[in-house]
């Protein structure tokens, strides 16, 4: 990825689906019984990564504002273990119940790099072994 200036709200996302579509619709996974999300991530460039938990077509009709978490990353390939209860929606978003509305009907996860008050930045992010753990 590469961010150029001037730009206040640039970002790059990778969206990962748990299951393929069925009859043109997203298929949800129930991950409400899990406490952690773990992933291996290689980062060269970004200082933080944003994960967002998405439930499209499952009762929630948000364009944006799903529960998310920003976390600091270290250069190189590292494993990160994140508590699902620590994912929060932005203050401006329509409220969803994390367990009932999102984790019971999860359709995808986005992994992204964002900039706020951008500076010229470029880098590489590789994601591997995303898993939910109890």
Image (spheres, rainbow, N blue to C red):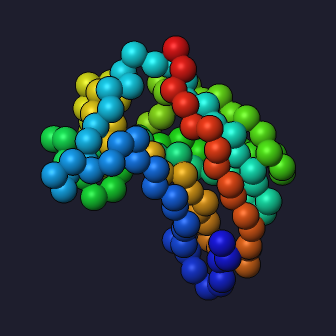
Residue 87: horizontal and vertical position, in percent?
48, 34
Q: Is residue 8 left or right of residue 2?
A: left
Q: Is residue 24 visible?
A: yes
Instruction: Name above or below for residue 110 compared with residue 86.
Output: below
**Could you tell me which quadrant the N terminus lies in?**
bottom right
- The residue at the point 35 percent across, 42 percent down is 19
Q: Position of residue 115 (x, y in %)?
A: 61, 66
Work out whether residue 62 or residue 117 is closer to the camera in this orientation and state it. 62
Closer to the camera, 18 or 7?
18
Whole-percent x and y of residue 102?
Answer: 31, 34
Q: Compared to 53, does 43 lie above or below?
A: below
Query: 91 left or right of 104?
Result: right
Q: In this view of the protein, which residue sits in the foreground, 126 or 1?
A: 126
Q: Residue drawn at (52%, 14%), measured in percent from left and top?
A: 134
The mark tally for this picture is: 0
Q: Residue at x 59, y 45 (%)?
A: 70
Does residue 98 appear in this view? no
Q: State the residue at coordinates (53%, 46%).
A: 51
- Percent x, y for residue 125? 69, 58
Picture layout, residue 108 above or below residue 7:
above
């Amino acid at each position: 990825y590469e961010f150029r200036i001037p730009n206040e709200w640039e970002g790059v996302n990778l969206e990962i689906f748990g299951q393929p579509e069925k009859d043109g619709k997203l298929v949800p996974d129930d991950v409400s019984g899990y406490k952690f999300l773990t992933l291996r991530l290689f980062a060269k460039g970004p200082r933080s990564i944003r994960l967002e938990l998405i439930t499209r077509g499952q009762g929630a009709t948000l364009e944006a504002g799903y529960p998310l978490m920003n976390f600091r990353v270290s250069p190189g390939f590292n494993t990160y273990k994140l508590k699902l209860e620590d994912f929060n929606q932005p203050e401006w978003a329509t409220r969803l119940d994390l367990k009932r509305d999102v984790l019971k009907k999860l359709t995808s996860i986005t992994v992204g790099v964002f900039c706020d008050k951008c500076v010229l930045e470029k880098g590489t992010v590789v994601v591997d072994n995303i898993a939910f753990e109890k």
